[in-house]
Image (cartoon, rainbow, N blue to C red):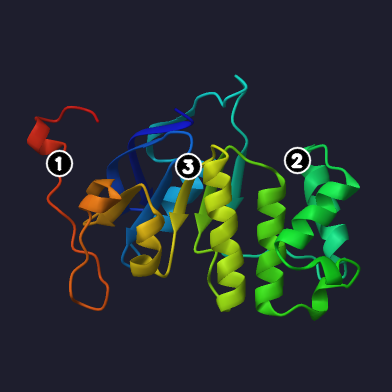
Amino acid sequence: MLLRARDLAHFYGPRLIFKDICLDLPPGALTVLAGANGAGKSTLLKILAGLIRPSTGSVETGENSRGQKPRIGYLGHQTFIYPELTALENLRFWTSLHGHAVTGSDYAAILERVELAPFAEEKARGFSRGMAQRLNLARVFLLEADILLLDEPGTGLDLRSSAVLLREILAARDKGAGIIWITHNLEEDLRHADSVAFLEGKRLAFYGPAKAFRLSERASVPRPEPFETREARGGEPC
């Protein structure tokens, strides 16, 4: 198992965001994290990434296929593009922070994959939103992370850029990465998922195979199957 979360709960001040959250992320699996706005999806993803600590509960990582601690790639709402640096300089700066060994051909290959090779030496300040987001995707995928945590990476992308994103996500899964993906296009992207974790009522209302998750007829809002709550199990930990 690449990542395991147990009994997570989180508060902002006195306000409970969620509780009793348990997730497992095996290699080569794609989990869609869904729920209404304000359900706590982004907060949960940051906890899994180790960016914030949960109020209670634990997150543990296992080992990758090489017997090492898995590398985590996190993509949030901000692009973290440095406008006065070129696309190539941005990538070099990011990889230097991670201490990841990358060659010139690696940079060229990732820029080609996200269709930014012709703009490698251009400063990012002139990039469109879609180009900036594709450069941000290149930053994450260049790390060859074992765990990918993606918070609505398709926001602001046109159809061409969205296709690039989906191709890279599926390629990472095929290489053995475990992926948790918050998507703004649930109905379309659900068909690519292995499992779904649906946050509702401050807990996981559904957590299971994607094929068992049903969408309601109301504007693509998910209607989850019943989930056996922790209380129903007599307070047993998940």
Vertical placement of residue 197 versus 128, above or below: above
Vertical placement of residue 187 versus 95, above or below: below
Bin the neighbour count of mark 2 within 10 Å (Cα to Cα): few under 14, some 14-19, many 20 and up: few
Q: CA distance from mark 3 to mark 1?
A: 21 Å
Q: Earlier in the sequence, mark 3 or mark 1?
A: 3
Residue 81 coordinates in the image, percent (x, y): 75, 65
- Residue of label 1: 229
Q: Quadrant of the N terminus?
A: top left
Q: Quadrant of the C terminus?
A: top left
The amino acid beneath tag 1 is: Thr
Dividing the picture into quadrants, the one containing residue 110 is bottom right
Q: CA distance from mark 1 to mark 2?
A: 39 Å
Residue sitting at 60 percent across and 19 percent down?
67
Would residue 93 be visible to someone looking at this image? no
Q: Residue furthest top?
A: 67
Residue 3 coordinates in the image, percent (x, y): 46, 33
Q: Earlier in the sequence, mark 2 or mark 3?
A: 3
Residue sitting at 31 percent across and 66 percent down?
36
The circle drawn on residue 48 is 3
